[in-house]
Image (tube, grey):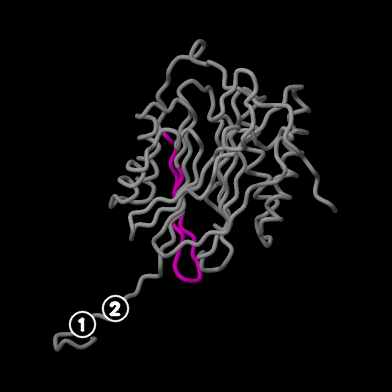
Amino acid sequence: MAPPTSSPNLLTPIEPDRAARLHVVARAPAVSEAVFPTASGRLVVAAASACGRYHEVNEDTHSELAGTGRLFVVADGVGGGAMPQLASRLLVDHLHDSLDGQPINANAVSVAMLYADRAIAAALARVTDRPGAATVALCAALDPAAASWLVSWVGDCRVYRWSPAAARLDALTVDDTFGHLGEAAPPGGSPDDPARMVGNGATAGANCARQTLAPRELLAICSDGVHKHLGAAEWRRVLAASLPLAARCEALVAKARANGSNDDATLLLVERQPRERHRAPIGREGTPS
């Protein structure tokens, strides 16, 4: 079966001013953590997600930390579109349904994105005549040791790689915004708004790139409610801290909120840890007992 085709079109939702009708509510982020074995050690994964101060519900969705631990997704329902929470949930679910347990490559991810685009549009059309969409970033391990990864995205969710040995933070994605794509934003829009999304026909597939992950390095997958409010120094300071991964994940979301993020804020961290080497106990004579 040939994959569906799609092209940028019609909807560019603009986030409404919800402050005029909703009270500011401070909500603690929901935090979860899991460990998955690999051929050379393990992946430690943590997620933190906080509802925006002016949102009734969290319109971000991320992968549940269960299953095989080979695919990790963060999706951001686009404000101004119909049912953004449903759009992001359907997108994450559809990507897992299409890709879990299957060989993953750039073509498979792009086809899955296009089918998700159609599925979200059809689901929303059953309950509303307004279009809706979500942006997304995903990371998929390509080998048993989780040393090689496919990074993919549509819109302005981002992926970073943190290398503790060099204290280096690298952006692995480039936002699909009107400004970066050299396109004119619609009336009332901004060059920083996402020009590509999934669910409204505004995608031709997905951006994809292969990346490596060395032992003790980690991937950070996040919505714009996180990355728009954190500077590189703040990322480095928290990621370098001697804290459990879940605590660092929660701290980064909290820092984005403290810096003025009123949007939904979601961060998923994936750390590749090597297998621990256990030494034999030393006896009294200085030899293994």
Q: Spatial distance from mark 1 to mark 2, Cα to Cα?
A: 9 Å
Residue 236 in view in this figure: yes
Magenta stretch contains residue 23: no
Which x, y percent locates residue 249? 39, 44
Magenta stretch contains residue 31: yes
Which x, y percent locates residue 206? 66, 47
Q: Which residues are magenta?
A: 29-47
Q: In this figure, which residue is indicated by the disc labeled 1? A: 282
Rendering quarter of residue 125: top right
Tell me the residue at 78%/28% (across/down).
Answer: 126
Which x, y percent locates residue 251? 35, 40
Q: Which secondary structure lies at badge 1? A: loop
The answer to which of 167 and 139 lies nearer the viewer is 167
**Residue 36 to residue 113: above or below:** below
Which x, y percent locates residue 175? 55, 40
Q: Quadrant of the C terminus?
A: bottom left
Q: In this figure, which residue is indicated by the disc labeled 2? A: 279
User: Dominant secondary structure of the magenta stretch?
Assistant: strand
